[in-house]
C-alpha cells in the first residue's frame, strides 16, 4: 500500500497527505528525468469531499509529491506539471522527477580548464541556485578532468549540458535523490548526487533478488538485436549547417559485419559541442552502448506480505545491482 505526501518543492516542507492513486508507471533513471501520473479522487467512498484545500495544496510547478510505502520509505517523487480536469470526479497530475527542473534553466557564461568533471557538474547546477529548487550536493571528485567553455549566447539548457558532460567516455552517473531530512519526516532534502564510474551498489553478488515463482509477477524480455537497441556503424553529430557541421569519424563494428551482419547505422546529435575531441568521445561512448546490442528485461514484482521475506522496492537505491532469476518454458535467465 502506497501513500502520497505533498511537500513544498523549494523548502521541502511537508504540507499535507491526500489519498491519491497511481495511474501510470512511476519511472526513475540515471542521467535523465522520470515521469509518472498520480490522480486525486475528489470524493471518498461515502461521497464526502476528501479535501476542500486540494487546489491550494497541490500546485503544479510548486509542489513535490512523495510516494511512500508502509515503512515511510520514499519510493518515488515527482513535480506535478499540470492539472488534468474532466467531466468526472478525479483530477490527474502528470509529474516529472526533480531532474526535470533543470530543463527550465539556461547555462550562463562559464569557463572550466583542467577541472574535475564532478566540479563542472556541480557548478552547472549551482548556477541555478537563484530561484532554484534548493539543492544539496554529494559530488565527490572523479579524477577525470575536462575543459569546458560555456556561453550564455548558446542558449543551452542546464539539463542538456550535464547530460552531454556525463555521457562521454569516462563520464559519470548523476541523479537528484529526495530523502527525509529529519526523523519526524516533516521535510525533505533534494540531493544532486554523482558517482564515478557508477552510482549505486554495483556488485557481482547482489543481496537483492527478483525471481519467478516468488516476487516476479510478470516480465518482458527484449532480444539483443531489437529495433533501436543496436548498430554496427555510429556517428556523433554536433552543431552547424552543411559542411560546417561538426561530425565525428564513423565508428564501425567490423567484427560483427565481417561475421555476416548487415550494416545498421545510428546517428545522434549533441548540441553545443565545440571541439572535435569531444564529438569523437561522444561517438566512442555511443559505439560502446550500441555495438553487440543490448538485452533489456523489464520485471514486474510485488512487495512481500505477512511472513514473506524477500526484496521490496524500498530496499533498492537507483543504480544498485539486483539479481534476476527467470525460469519459464520460453526463457531461463540468471
Image: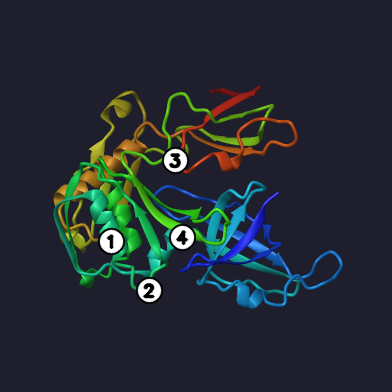
Q: Read off the residue under disc 4.
A: 98
Residue 238: tell me if it is visible. yes
Instruction: Estimate how packed mark 1 is, as few (under 14), some (14 to 19) or many (20 or more) residues with alpha carbons within 10 Å.
Output: many
**Dots 2 and 3: beta carbons under 8 Å?**
no
How far apart are the alpha carbons under marks 2 and 4? 15 Å
* Coordinates of residue 88 in the picture (x, y in percent): 76, 72
Closer mark to the observer between disc 1 and disc 2: 2
Q: Residue at x 76, y 71 (%)?
A: 89
Q: Residue at x 75, y 70 (%)?
A: 50
- The total of numbered circles placed on residues is 4
Q: Read off the residue under disc 3.
A: 319
Q: Nearer the viewer, residue 291 or 115?
A: 115
How far apart are the alpha carbons under marks 3 and 1? 23 Å
As drawn, which residue projects farthest toward the left? 113
Q: Which mark is residue 29?
A: none
* Coordinates of residue 91 in the picture (x, y in percent): 68, 70
Please report whichever mark, 1 or 2, sits nearer to the chain's N-terminal start. Answer: 1
Quadrant hosting residue 171: top left
Please report whichever mark, 3 or 1, sits nearer to the chain's N-terminal start. Answer: 1
Q: Is residue 321 shown left or right of residue 327? A: left
Please report whichever mark, 2 or 3, sits nearer to the chain's N-terminal start. Answer: 2
307 over 316 or under it: above or below:
above
Quadrant hosting residue 271: bottom left
**Dots 4 and 1: beta carbons under 8 Å?**
no
How far apart are the alpha carbons under marks 4 and 3? 17 Å
Q: Which mark is residue 124?
A: 1
Q: Is residue 73 shown left or right of residue 161? A: right
Q: Read off the residue under disc 2.
A: 131
Q: How is the image coloured?
A: rainbow
Q: Nearer the viewer, residue 324 or 191?
A: 191
Closer mark to the observer between disc 2 and disc 4: 2
Amino acid at each position: 500500500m502506497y501513500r502520497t505526501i505533498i511537500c513544498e518543492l523549494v523548502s521541502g516542507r511537508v504540507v499535507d497527505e491526500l489519498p491519491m492513486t497511481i495511474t501510470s508507471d512511476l519511472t526513475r533513471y540515471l542521467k535523465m528525468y522520470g515521469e509518472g501520473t498520480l490522480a486525486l479522487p475528489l470524493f471518498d467512498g461515502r461521497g464526502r469531499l476528501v479535501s476542500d484545500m486540494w487546489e491550494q495544496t497541490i500546485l503544479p510547478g510548486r509542489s513535490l509529491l512523495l510516494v511512500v510505502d508502509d515503512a515511510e520509505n520514499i519510493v518515488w517523487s515527482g513535480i506535478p506539471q499540470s492539472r488534468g480536469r474532466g467531466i468526472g470526479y478525479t483530477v490527474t497530475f502528470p509529474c516529472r522527477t526533480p531532474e526535470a527542473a533543470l530543463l527550465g534553466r539556461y547555462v550562463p557564461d562559464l569557463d572550466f580548464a583542467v577541472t574535475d568533471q564532478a566540479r563542472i557538474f556541480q557548478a552547472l547546477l549551482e548556477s541555478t541556485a537563484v530561484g532554484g529548487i534548493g539543492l544539496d550536493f554529494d559530488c565527490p571528485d572523479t579524477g577525470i578532468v575536462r575543459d569546458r567553455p560555456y556561453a550564455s549566447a548558446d542558449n543551452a539548457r542546464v539539463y542538456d549540458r550535464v547530460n552531454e558532460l556525463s555521457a562521454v567516455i569516462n563520464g559519470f552517473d548523476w541523479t537528484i535523490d529526495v530523502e527525509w531530512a529529519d526523523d519526524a519526516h516533516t521535510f525533505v532534502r533534494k540531493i544532486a548526487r554523482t558517482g564515478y564510474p557508477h552510482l549505486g551498489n554495483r556488485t557481482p553478488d547482489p543481496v537483492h533478488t527478483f525471481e519467478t515463482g516468488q516476487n516476479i509477477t510478470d516480465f518482458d524480455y527484449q532480444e539483443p538485436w531489437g529495433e533501436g537497441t543496436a548498430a554496427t556503424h555510429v556517428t556523433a553529430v554536433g552543431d552547424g549547417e552543411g559542411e560546417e557541421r561538426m561530425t565525428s569519424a564513423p565508428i564501425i563494428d567490423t567484427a560483427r559485419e565481417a561475421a555476416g551482419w548487415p550494416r545498421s547505422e545510428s546517428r545522434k546529435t549533441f548540441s553545443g559541442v565545440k571541439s572535435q575531441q569531444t564529438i569523437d568521445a561522444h561517438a566512442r561512448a555511443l559505439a560502446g552502448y550500441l555495438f553487440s546490442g543490448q538485452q533489456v528485461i523489464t520485471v514486474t514484482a510485488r512487495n512481500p506480505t505477512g511472513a514473506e521475506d524477500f526484496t521490496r522496492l524500498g530496499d533498492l537505491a537507483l543504480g544498485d545491482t539486483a539479481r534476476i532469476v527467470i525460469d519459464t518454458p520460453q526463457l531461463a535467465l540468471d
